Amino acid sequence: MLDRRAQVGETMTWIVATIVIIVILVISIYIAGASGIAKKAILGREFEIKGHNDLLVTKSFVGYLLTKEEGEIENVFGQMVELNENERIQNIIINPDLAKKIFKEIYNNDYPDNSWMGFILVQGSVKGKLIQTIFPNTYFGDKEGEIDNLKSYYYDEVWLDKEGKIGLELIRKD
C-alpha cells in the first residue's frame, strides 16, 4: 500500500512538471510570434511585418504571392520578380482582381480607411536609409504618407531583388 502512494506522488510530480513546461513553451512561442517586427522568409527572400501584426493578413498576402494564375507556369511572386524596371514603374500588379478582392473587399471591415499594394523602387541608400520611390497605381491608388491617430495599421514588404520590393499597406484610423 505504501508503494502505491509513492508511485502516485511521483507520477503527479511529473504531470505537474510537464504541464508547467508546456505552458512556458506556449507563452514563449506566442511572445516570439507577436513581436512588432518579425522577419519571415518566403521563397528565399525576407519580408518584414511592421505595425499591427495580423496573422490572417500575413497569410493572405503570402497566399496571394504563391497563387498561380490559370495557364501560368510561375506564381504571382515569380512573375513579379521577372518584371523589368519599366513595368515596375508602371506598377503592373499580377492578378489585380484577386488582389483587390482580398485586400479591398475581404479586409474592408478591419481596415476601411486605406488599402494599398504596389511596387516600391529602391534607388540606393544614404547613411543606411533607403532612397525609394512609391508609385500610385490604377488598382489601389496612392500609398498613405505618415499618418497620426491610427487605430490599426498593417504593412508588409517583400523584396523582389535589390532594386525593388512589393508592399501591402492596410489602415484603420480612429
Image (cartoon, rainbow, N blue to C red):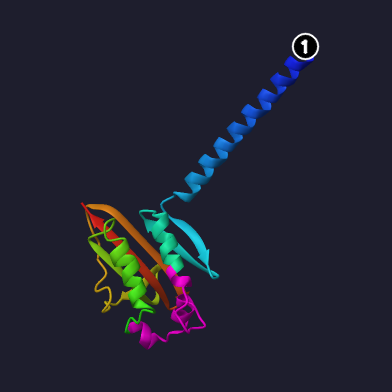
Q: Can residue 154 be seen in this view?
A: yes
Q: Relative to 93, is 150 above or below?
A: above
Instruction: Determine the image quadrant of residue 44.
Output: bottom right
Q: Position of residue 147 (x, y in %)?
A: 23, 59
Give me the residue at 39% from left, 79% from top.
94
**Residue 163 location, quadrant:** bottom left
In percent of width and height, residue 160 lies at 46, 75
Q: Which amino acid does label 1 sit on?
A: Leu
Q: Which element carries disc 1, helix, strand or loop? A: helix
Let me know if residue 70 is in the magenta part. yes
- Write down the region rendered in magenta: 64-89
Which residue is at 49% across, 45% downward? 30
Residue at position x 34%, y 59% in the image: 154
Question: Is residue 104 depicted above or below 5 in this figure?
Answer: below
In the picture, which quadrant includes the N terminus? Answer: top right
The reply to whether residue 162 is in sight is no
User: Is residue 34 left or right of 140 when viewed as pictured?
Assistant: right
Residue identifier under label 1? 2
